[in-house]
């Protein structure tokens, strides 16, 4: 639609198509100094939702409706929707413009990418900002994105991310079967659009199997945060059994060690591959076996008829639980007792131990400056690996264990994965390294704005942007869930004057304001809440507010 003030001539438009785009050309006579307004209406329809024969008719109807409403009505509806998004999930940082800009940029990109209304869809690592990775799904969704959507959206949004994986369970079983696994073992793909493995590098496809654990962890994380056990009983239990069966077949018993080992894997640190006994992979495998066993026991006790239905469907036998228990008890985990650290994998300390600070700036990023042979022989870590395990399973380890491992591995990590800085930021906050926590927050929040890894031209790092939110809420806000309650251990970087964030938790909405002198929590719901601040329990009445001095 072209409008011009005064007289003008509008000739018929011409349409054209070429590879990856369609065009429309308008020719019009323009009077000197007369303004011209072009209004362009675009509708998008997919064969996912409409038969191909209906697409054109549906699109035309949608287009006519849009034109009838007009730009102003559409723009107002758009603004209203975004206003509600910001009401639910905005984070306000006072005293640091760069930090504030970073988190809002990330939140905007996340909600521009995914609305969660369709369980057939997931979150591409580049969203709609670039074609790298082809819009495929990675384990990033479960590890990083799920917590963001659980806390800022309706519960159904997060649940749809879990349903997405349940709907692809048959494909995961097929993927495992193609690799020689049996009895319904499931291996979820590293990269997928429809449940089939879409990655083409063997060391990723066959070896970076820790992603299977992230699928199971998401079920645990969802249940822990929302209190909703129905998903696991209805669907998730089948996913867990498939994954547990995979782990039980993937390990083997070492007669030399008299323990189970995990050979030939690639951990989260992709600057290593085909290693033995990657600590994180082995730990999450054992955790999966234990969690699945617990969920089976829960279902047996609380819904025996449902368990009978599931056990028949998947041909489950009690002997499997016995095998899982044996693996849980006898799994080998590499560690160095003298240093008091978990070893990333067998032989890690055989590498020349050079710190990142000793690298010339001209050598970074390694994946653009070094050969892969050189990278693989180095001690340098692309992203959180052992520390990823400490982040997921922090309740299993004391603070000193966190600190020793963080102090060892952080100086060797080059953070050349977008998924890395947020984990380091959260752990640094936990152990009291506030300078490092803030440094890593800026790195994750401004990764694309500052193009830290010299790769933003390929598109933005959408899935890691959820990690930016985690860095604020879990790092600076110290938010955790234990025993069905929210727990806060907040701190602010010294130059922040205040931090505000809002989370949805079960039936409640909680607003939190942290300053250098205190914390203020508002219960925006019709039921009272019980929670802790620095280990001290507090109660807030419905629609009430609590003010307490910092660290009181």
Image (cartoon, grey):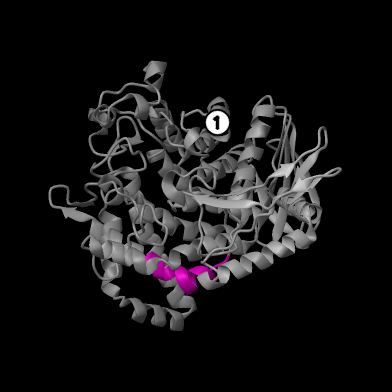
Q: Residue 156 placed where, x, y %?
A: 60, 64
The residue that appears at 58% across and 62% down in the rendered structure is 45
Q: Residue 383 placed where, x, y %?
A: 41, 36
Looking at the picture, does residue 362 appear above or below residue 351? Answer: above
Q: Is any atom of residue 210 visible in this view?
A: yes
- Mark 1 residue element: helix
- Please indicate whether residue 82 sits to the left or right of residue 302 in the image: right
Taking the view exactly as shown, the residue that stands out farthest to the left is 256
- Give the quarter of the figure containing the C terminus: top right
Closer-to-camera residue (457/405): 457
Q: Which residue is mark 1?
A: 437
- Please indicate whether residue 352 sits to the left or right of residue 292 in the image: left
Classify residue 4 by image quadrant: top right
- Please indicate whether residue 281 sits to the left or right of residue 85 in the image: left
The residue that appears at 55% across and 31% down in the rendered structure is 437
Taking the view exactly as shown, the residue that stands out farthest to the right is 6
Range covered by the magenta-colored residues:
228-241
Q: Is any atom of residue 51 visible in this view?
A: no
Q: Residues within 10 Å of mark 1 (few under 14, many from 20)?
A: many
Q: Does 234 lie within the magenta span?
A: yes
């Amino acid at each position: 639609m072209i409008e011009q003030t005064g007289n003008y001539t509008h000739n018929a438009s011409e349409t054209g198509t070429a590879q990856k785009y369609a065009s429309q050309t308008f020719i019009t006579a323009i009077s000197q100094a007369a303004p011209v307004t072009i209004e362009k209406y675009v509708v998008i329809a997919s064969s996912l939702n409409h038969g191909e024969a209906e697409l054109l008719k549906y699109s035309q109807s949608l287009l006519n409706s849009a034109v009838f409403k007009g730009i102003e009505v559409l723009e107002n509806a758009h603004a209203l929707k975004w206003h509600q998004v910001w009401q639910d999930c905005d984070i306000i940082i006072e005293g640091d413009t760069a930090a504030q800009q970073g988190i809002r940029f990330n939140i905007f990109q996340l909600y521009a990418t995914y609305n969660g209304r369709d369980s057939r869809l997931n979150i591409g690592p580049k969203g709609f900002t670039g074609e790298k990775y082809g819009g495929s799904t990675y384990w990033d969704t479960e590890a990083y994105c799920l917590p963001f959507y659980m806390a800022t959206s309706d519960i159904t949004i997060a649940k749809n991310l879990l349903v997405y994986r349940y709907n692809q369970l048959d494909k995961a079983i097929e993927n495992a079967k193609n690799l020689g696994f049996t009895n319904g073992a499931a291996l979820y793909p590293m990269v997928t659009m429809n449940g089939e493995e879409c990655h083409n590098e063997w060391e990723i496809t066959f070896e970076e199997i820790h992603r299977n654990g992230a699928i199971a962890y998401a079920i645990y994380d969802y249940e822990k945060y929302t209190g909703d056990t129905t998903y696991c009983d209805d669907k998730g239990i089948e996913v867990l059994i498939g994954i547990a069966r995979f782990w039980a077949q993937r390990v083997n018993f070492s007669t030399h060690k008299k323990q189970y080992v995990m050979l030939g894997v690639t951990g989260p640190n992709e600057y290593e591959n085909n290693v033995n006994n990657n600590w994180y992979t082995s730990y999450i495998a054992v955790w999966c076996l234990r969690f699945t066993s617990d969920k089976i026991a829960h279902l047996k006790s609380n819904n025996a008829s449902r368990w009978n239905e599931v056990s028949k469907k998947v041909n489950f036998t009690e002997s499997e639980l016995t095998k899982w228990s044996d693996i849980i008890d006898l799994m080998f985990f590499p560690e160095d007792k003298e240093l008091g650290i978990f070893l990333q994998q067998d032989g890690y300390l055989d590498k020349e131990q050079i710190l990142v600070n000793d690298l010339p700036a001209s050598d970074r990023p390694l994946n653009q400056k070094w050969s892969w042979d050189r990278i693989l022989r180095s001690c340098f870590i692309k992203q959180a690996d052992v520390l990823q395990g400490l982040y997921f399973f922090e309740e299993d380890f004391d603070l000193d264990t966190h600190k020793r491992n963080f102090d060892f591995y952080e100086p060797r990590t080059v953070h050349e994965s977008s998924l890395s800085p947020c984990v380091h930021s959260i752990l640094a906050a936990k152990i009291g390294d506030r300078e490092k926590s803030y440094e890593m927050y800026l790195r994750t929040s401004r990764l694309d704005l500052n193009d830290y890894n010299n790769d933003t031209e390929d598109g933005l790092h959408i899935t890691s942007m959820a990690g930016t939110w985690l860095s604020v809420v879990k790092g600076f806000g110290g938010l955790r869930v234990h025993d069905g309650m929210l727990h806060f251990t907040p701190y602010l970087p010294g130059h922040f004057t205040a931090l505000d964030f809002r989370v949805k938790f079960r039936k409640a909405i909680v607003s939190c304001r942290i300053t250098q002198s205190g914390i203020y929590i508002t219960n925006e719901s019709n039921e009272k809440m019980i929670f802790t601040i620095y280990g001290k329990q507090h109660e807030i009445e419905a629609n009430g507010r609590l003010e307490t001095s910092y660290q009181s």
